[in-house]
């Protein structure tokens, strides 16, 4: 089986790199699809993964486009780009890949699976707990230890499959933590709740207390999920899943630590769009569908869009300025 990681940045590089590193254990072919600068750096010098236990350089196969890979029936494509780039990736795949490839959405938010299912019949969700930083082409820092990631997987909208079980087994043999579960979207909605803080992490001056915004943003989300009848993994369940498996640790050798979450990284790299519309924006959507007010999440969407589009420096806005926009 070929496993393709499409959109290899921080998350995709760690997943693909570890699968490639331990390919002798699971026997699958691994290929990354990455943006030009990252692709060129990996081709020239290999993929460097720094984590709390040390560094490794991996000469993993990498291409820039899905059309450069001879995809066949039964192959697995793991999507790791941000949601604003998912439709373009799926369009490229739909023109090239057999309909019966397995699509795995290893992305934040809960919209990617719906987008994929419009084009491909065999879609899986993956809940990604993988703290990683990608600020330099060819180099990724993974801060999780003793394992870099927890990557539970399940069929979408529900159920387990042989393909999902095979992928979970390959991840496990590659030093990552994964299991096949029948209700993966419960985990992904719990992760969505955590990701509501990504905008604040990217916008607010470092060190300021954000609870005046984070608490009502979460309360709005809880009310929206309740109104929509959506279940999610509890905080106790999440803590139990992580216990003894993964926690944040300093990167070995004094290299870069975890500077911030995915939205901060996007803005710090100069991106003009972020995934906020599929994080806080998912709560705004649910609120509008079910008659639940969501002023804090709506404001965070508006400000994050504006900040990215106009090049506002990350972590430059006081909490008081955001509160004044409500």
Image (cartoon, rainbow, N blue to C red):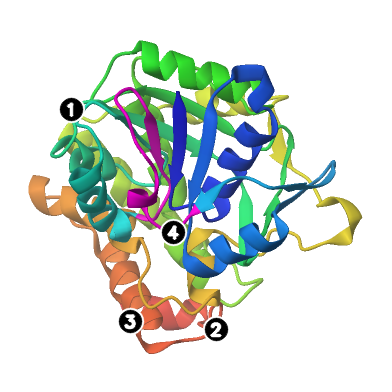
Secondary structure beneath label 1: loop
> What residue did someone put label 2 on?
316
Residue plotted at (47% across, 57% down): 197
Residue lying at the far right of the rendered structure: 253
> What residue did someone put label 3 on?
306
Secondary structure beneath label 3: helix
Q: Quadrant of the N terminus?
A: top left
Instruction: From the image, state whether disc 1 or disc 2 is nearer to you.
Output: 1
Secondary structure beneath label 2: loop
**Magenta region's main secondary structure?**
loop
Mark 4: few/some/many CA within 10 Å (<14, 14-19, 20+): some
Closer-to-camera residue (283/144): 144
Q: Position of residue 81 (x, y in %)?
A: 40, 53
CA separation, marks 4 and 2?
34 Å
Mark 4 and mark 1 lie on one chain; the one further toward the N terminus is 4
Q: Position of residue 305 (x, y in %)?
A: 32, 75
Asked if residue 203 is positioned above or below residue 116 in the image, the reply reads below
Task: Tell me, yes or no, if residue 232 can be seen here.
Answer: no
Task: Tell me, yes or no, if residue 143 can be seen here.
Answer: yes
Closer-to-camera residue (205/246): 246
Mark 1 and mark 2 lie on one chain; the one further toward the N terminus is 1
Q: Position of residue 91 (x, y in %)?
A: 20, 52
Q: Which residues are magenta?
A: 63-82
> What residue did someone put label 4 on?
64
Mark 2: few/some/many CA within 10 Å (<14, 14-19, 20+): few
CA separation, marks 4 and 3?
30 Å
Q: Is residue 277 left or right of residue 251?
A: left
CA separation, marks 1 and 2?
44 Å
Residue plotted at (32% across, 50% down): 67
Residue 75 counted in the magenta span = yes
> What residue did someone put label 1 on?
121
Instruction: From the image, state whether disc 1 or disc 3 is nearer to you.
Output: 1
């Amino acid at each position: 089986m070929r496993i393709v990681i499409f959109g290899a940045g921080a998350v995709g590089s760690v997943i693909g790199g570890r699968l490639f590193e331990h390919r002798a254990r699971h026997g699958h072919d691994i290929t990354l699809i990455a943006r030009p600068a990252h692709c060129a750096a990996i081709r020239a010098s290999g993929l460097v993964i720094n984590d709390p236990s040390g560094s490794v350089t991996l000469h993993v196969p990498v291409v820039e486009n899905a059309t450069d890979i001879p995809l066949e029936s039964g192959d697995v494509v793991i999507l790791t780009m941000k949601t604003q780039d998912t439709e373009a990736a799926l369009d490229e795949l739909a023109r090239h890949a057999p309909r019966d490839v397995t699509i795995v959405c290893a992305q934040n938010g809960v919209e990617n699976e719906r987008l994929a299912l419009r084009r491909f019949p065999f879609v899986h969700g993956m809940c990604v707990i993988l703290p990683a930083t990608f600020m330099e082409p060819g180099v990724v820092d993974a801060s999780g230890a003793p394992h870099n990631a927890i990557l539970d997987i399940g069929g979408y909208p529900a159920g387990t499959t042989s393909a999902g079980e095979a992928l979970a087994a390959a991840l496990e043999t590659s030093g990552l933590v994964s299991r096949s579960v029948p209700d993966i979207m419960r985990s992904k909605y719990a992760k969505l709740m955590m990701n509501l803080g990504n905008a604040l992490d990217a916008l607010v001056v470092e060190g300021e207390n954000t609870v005046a915004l984070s608490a009502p943003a979460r309360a709005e989300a809880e009310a929206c999920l309740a109104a929509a009848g959506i279940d999610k993994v509890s905080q106790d369940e999440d803590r139990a899943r992580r216990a003894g498996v993964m926690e944040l640790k300093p990167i070995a050798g004094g290299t870069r630590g975890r500077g911030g979450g995915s939205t901060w990284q996007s803005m710090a790299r100069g991106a003009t769009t972020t995934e906020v519309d599929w994080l806080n924006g998912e709560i705004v959507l649910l609120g509008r569908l079910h008659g639940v007010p969501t002023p804090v999440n709506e404001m965070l969407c508006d400000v994050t869009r504006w900040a990215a589009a106009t090049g506002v420096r990350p972590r430059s806005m006081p909490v008081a300025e955001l509160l004044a926009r409500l």
